[in-house]
């Protein structure tokens, strides 16, 4: 008895040798096919029909039936998942899982038990094409190709050249086919035939999948190079073009490195001019009279070190903030000029890598409120201009090569002179 959603189809099969019903070998098969066409979805009916198909010498009816009822690999995986839910979860858990999917009908278990069908076909030792089709239904392409190599190598090549096959899997499958061709002992002149078969595999898969060096381990130890000279020449030509491409990339890298060296040399002698009455952009304190270092950015803004730390520190991560504090403590205690220069360069890179008023910090602070208690002179916010009527102070700074700054982030760090 097979139950469906709307109807119940009762089937009684007498497989004894006494009934007149089984006198015709195909009568039972035709009857079950008709029952399925009428809408029967019983798994027992499908399984019994499969067992009748595998007894037949002609594989075509079985193969056509599987082509009509074996779902795609993705659908088969969903059906397997649904079968797992049915056997391991109670009804409440099943309803919870099914509700997570938009289309619960897509998880409905198909009436054909593909696992049973595959076991039944393989136990007979024939009808391997049907087994290959079932392997593909499970998504087991490698097992399908392995079985196809024993039955029909041309079918194995069709399976390996599928559109949905990834590049790595395609190469692995074609290597299996080439190895099988190399181990084929058929033919009188075995060594010559092996080379010809392997070369044919190379032509079928294409040079973008396999090359001559991939299949060389499969060739006999003694073979004439004339048979594979064309493939060797193609491989050498491909290597030559790749080498030319690499040389071109190396030349481009050399040019880029030369341009960077020139830029570093230019920045090492970079000079900036500021007005003698320049003030800090945040505190409005004259920078030349302040007893602390100050920074001059390419944008023209001048900022004292203490004001810069106050503005930049909130935008540094925890690790950077701890490093800034550590470097400042080391600079206060340091007595070696060389070591102090290295620490000062690292500190400059952390706090003055970008202008606080025109760089990324200003963009990140777009959602911050205006400082209500800070009185900032409007003139001090304008970039400093070079004036020929006043005596400008020329400041030269050697930018450390270990730091990397863009056009808007380069800076000049100046220690005030005692004479000023």
Image (tube, grey):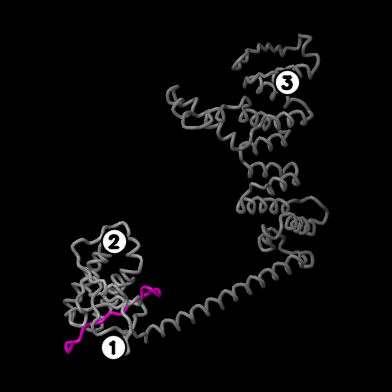
> Crowdedness of circle 3 by 10 Å Cα count: few (<14), some, many (20+)?
some
Q: Nearer the viewer, mark 2 or mark 1?
A: 1
Question: With 317 as the anchor, is 100 left or right in this view?
Answer: right
> Crowdedness of circle 1 by 10 Å Cα count: few (<14), some, many (20+)?
some
Q: Nearer the viewer, residue 72 or 195?
A: 72
- Chain-order first, disc 2 or disc 3: 3
Question: With 266 as the anchor, is 319 left or right in this view?
Answer: left
Question: With 142 as the anchor, is 328 left or right in this view?
Answer: left
Where is residue 417, by image quadrant? bottom left
Where is residue 197, by image quadrant? bottom right
Query: Across the whole image, how many numbered discs are drawn on residues?
Result: 3
> Which residue is labeled 1 in the image?
392
Q: Nearer the viewer, mark 2 or mark 3?
A: 2
Residue 210 within the magenta-colored segment of the rendering: no
Task: Tell me which residue sits at (71%, 42%) in the image.
Answer: 148
Magenta segment range?
Answer: 403-420
Residue 410 within the magenta-colored segment of the rendering: yes
> Which residue is labeled 3 in the image?
33
Disc 2/disc 3 C-alpha distance (Å): 72 Å
Q: Nearer the viewer, mark 3 or mark 1?
A: 1
């Amino acid at each position: 008895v097979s139950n469906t959603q709307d109807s119940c189809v009762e089937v009684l099969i007498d497989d004894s040798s006494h009934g007149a019903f089984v006198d015709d070998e195909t009568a039972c098969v035709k009857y079950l096919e008709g029952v399925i066409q009428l809408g029967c979805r019983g798994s027992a009916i499908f399984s019994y029909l499969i067992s009748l198909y595998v007894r037949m010498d002609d594989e075509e009816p079985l193969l056509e039936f599987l082509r009509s009822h074996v779902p795609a690999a993705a659908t088969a995986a969903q059906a397997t998942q649904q079968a797992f839910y049915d056997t391991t979860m109670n009804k409440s858990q099943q309803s919870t899982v099914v509700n997570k999917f938009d289309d619960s009908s897509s998880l409905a278990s198909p009436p054909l038990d593909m696992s049973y069908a595959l076991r039944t076909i393989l136990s007979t030792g024939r009808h391997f094409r049907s087994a290959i089709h079932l392997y593909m239904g499970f998504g087991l392409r490698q097992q399908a190709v392995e079985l196809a190599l024993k039955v029909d190598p041309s079918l194995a090549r069709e399976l390996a050249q599928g559109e949905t096959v990834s590049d790595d899997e395609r190469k692995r499958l074609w290597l299996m086919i080439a190895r099988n061709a190399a181990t084929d002992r058929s033919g009188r002149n075995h060594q010559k035939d092996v080379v010809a078969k392997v070369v044919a595999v190379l032509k079928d898969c294409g040079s973008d999948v396999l090359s001559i060096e991939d299949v060389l381990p499969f060739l006999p130890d003694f073979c004439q190079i004339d048979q594979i000279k064309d493939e060797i020449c193609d491989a050498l030509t491909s290597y030559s073009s790749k080498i030319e491409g690499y040389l071109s990339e190396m030349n481009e890298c050399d040019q880029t490195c030369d341009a960077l060296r020139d830029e570093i040399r230019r920045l090492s002698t970079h000079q900036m001019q500021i007005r003698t009455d320049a003030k800090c952009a945040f505190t409005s304190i004259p920078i030349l009279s302040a007893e602390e270092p100050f920074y001059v950015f390419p944008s023209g803004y001048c900022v004292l070190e203490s004001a810069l730390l106050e503005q930049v520190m909130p935008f540094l991560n925890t690790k950077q903030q701890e490093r800034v504090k550590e470097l400042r403590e080391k600079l206060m205690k340091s007595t070696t000029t060389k070591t102090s220069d290295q620490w000062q360069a690292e500190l400059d890179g952390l706090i003055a890598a970008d202008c606080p008023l025109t760089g990324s910090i200003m963009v990140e602070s777009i959602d911050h409120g205006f400082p209500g208690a800070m009185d900032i002179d409007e003139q001090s916010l304008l970039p400093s201009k070079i004036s020929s009527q006043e005596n400008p102070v020329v400041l030269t700074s050697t930018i450390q090569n270990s730091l990397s700054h863009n056009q808007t982030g380069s800076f000049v760090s100046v220690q005030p002179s005692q004479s000023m």
